[in-house]
Amino acid sequence: MHQRLCVCTTMRRATRALTRAYDEALAPFGITVQQFAILRDIQRAGTIPLPRLAEGLVMDRTSLYRALPPLEREGLLVLESPSPRSRTATLTPAGQQRVADANPAWESLQTRILSAMQPGEWDQMQSSADRLATQLVSGTI
């Protein structure tokens, strides 16, 4: 019987390699790819409630809440509590500038990775990964 590789192990291996590459590309800007993703999602939203930010990033709230204070200490974002039970995040001008400065390095690596793939390969991978994530999050798998 042919033994299949573990889906999780295979995906994690690819994710670790990609994370390492993006982290190296973004290191000159003092941020990791996780921090870049957080900053970009906040930038796109303007001001965003933290639970919605966590949901959009498919991060558990605890991990997100641990990732935010260093960004706040660097002056890249502001966390506010508009009510006792809610918190929001907004980028500061320094945060906007950090995203703008780092974006060309991110784009360059993104282009190199995509150009290493066969035509249509990324679209198929993205569609499959999005579908799998949706099914796992919704509990249909």
Image (cartoon, rainbow, N blue to C red):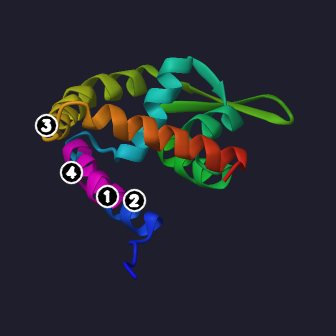
* Real-space Cα separation, disc 1 to disc 4, in angstroms: 16 Å
The N terminus is located in which quarter? Answer: bottom left
**What residue is shown with label 2?**
11
Q: Nearer the viewer, residue 1 or 34?
A: 1
| Kind of element beneath mark 2 | helix
Task: Say whether residue 133 is visible.
Answer: yes
Mark 2 near mark 3, Cβ–Cβ under 8 Å?
Answer: no
Please tell me how crowded label 1 is: few (under 14), some (14-19), or many (20+) other residues with Cα within 10 Å: few
Instruction: State the count of labels.
Output: 4
- For residue 129: magenta? no
Q: Is residue 131 left or right of residue 97?
A: right
Residue beneath the point at 20% across and 35% down: 114
* Residue 136 coordinates in the image, percent (x, y): 63, 50
Mark 2 or mark 3: whose residue is earlier in sequence: 2
Residue type marked 1: Ala
**What residue is shown with label 1?**
14
Task: Say whether residue 75 is visible.
Answer: no
| Kind of element beneath mark 4 | helix
Mark 1 or mark 4: whose residue is earlier in sequence: 1
Mark 1 or mark 3: whose residue is earlier in sequence: 1
Q: Nearer the viewer, residue 134 or 77?
A: 134
Q: Is residue 81 left or right of residue 107?
A: right
* Real-space Cα separation, disc 1 to disc 3, in angstroms: 16 Å
* Residue 4 coordinates in the image, percent (x, y): 40, 72
Residue type marked 2: Met
Task: Say if 135 sits above or below 17 in the image.
Answer: above
Of the numbered discs in the image, which one, if any, rests on residue 24? 4
Mark 1 near mark 4, Cβ–Cβ under 8 Å?
Answer: no
Residue type marked 3: Arg
